[in-house]
Amino acid sequence: MAASDRDNSQVPPSGGSIEYLSAPALEARMREEISRAGRHGTTLSCLLLDIEDLEEIARTHGPELAERTLAYAGLALRRELRGFDRVGRPSDAELLIVLPGADGPRGEIVARRMLRRLREIKLEVHGERRALRIAIGLAAWREGTTAEQLLAEARAAVGRERLGFRDALRL
């Protein structure tokens, strides 16, 4: 059982993981970036990544494979992000990417690049390979928006994408 794509040199070893901000650390980071954006008049976007297969993977093949799949996706994402972008886990099945200095259109560019990259990943179980089903929701910070509201907006965008709306990544 493994997750792979065209460059499997970064596959985490069995039981390996990538470091994510915990939910409390992620919330603190979001508040910090919101404060900075408000003080300096800069932009901020967040992308919420949902691997739709994760619960099924955990149920069918065990939580270790689900965790390794999420870790592999995280490694793939790191290659697409800037050094100061942050990836955290607001829940066990989600990744939130904080993009300081990125407005909605720039966030959408990053989201589309991530989707292309993540859709290259194939999950291999018992000799069968299949692509992961992935949804990404985009939320751009506006004056007065809290960290909780920003996360809620990103989750709502994931829901719209799941329903098949083509503009799920648009603001």
Image (cartoon, rainbow, N blue to C red):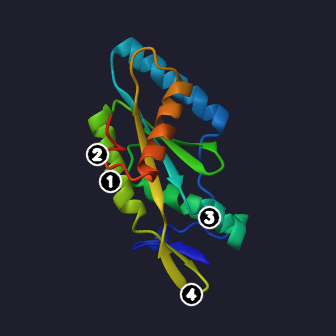
Q: Which residue is mark 2?
A: 109
Q: Residue at x 33, y 46 (%)?
A: 110
Q: Are marks 4 and 1 in contact (CB under 8 Å)?
A: no
Instruction: Give the label on residue 155, or none.
Output: none
The spot of residue 127 in percent (x, y) is: 56, 87
The type of residue carrying mark 1 is Arg
Q: Which one is earlier in the sequence, the residue at label 4 or at label 2? A: 2
- What secondary structure is found at the residue carrying circle 3? helix
Q: CA distance from mark 2 to mark 1?
A: 6 Å
Q: Residues within 10 Å of mark 4 (few under 14, many from 20)?
A: few
Placement of 99 over or under 28, stated as above or below: below
- Residue 128 horizontal side relative to residue 24, left or right: left
Quarter of the picture holding the C terminus? top left
Q: Which residue is mark 1?
A: 113
- What secondary structure is found at the residue carrying circle 2? helix
**Callout in the foreground (3, 2):** 2
The type of residue carrying mark 4 is Gly
Q: CA distance from mark 3 to mark 2?
A: 27 Å
- What secondary structure is found at the residue carrying circle 1? helix
Q: CA distance from mark 1 to mark 3?
A: 22 Å
Q: CA distance from mark 4 to mark 1?
A: 28 Å
Q: Which one is earlier in the sequence, the residue at label 3 or at label 2? A: 3
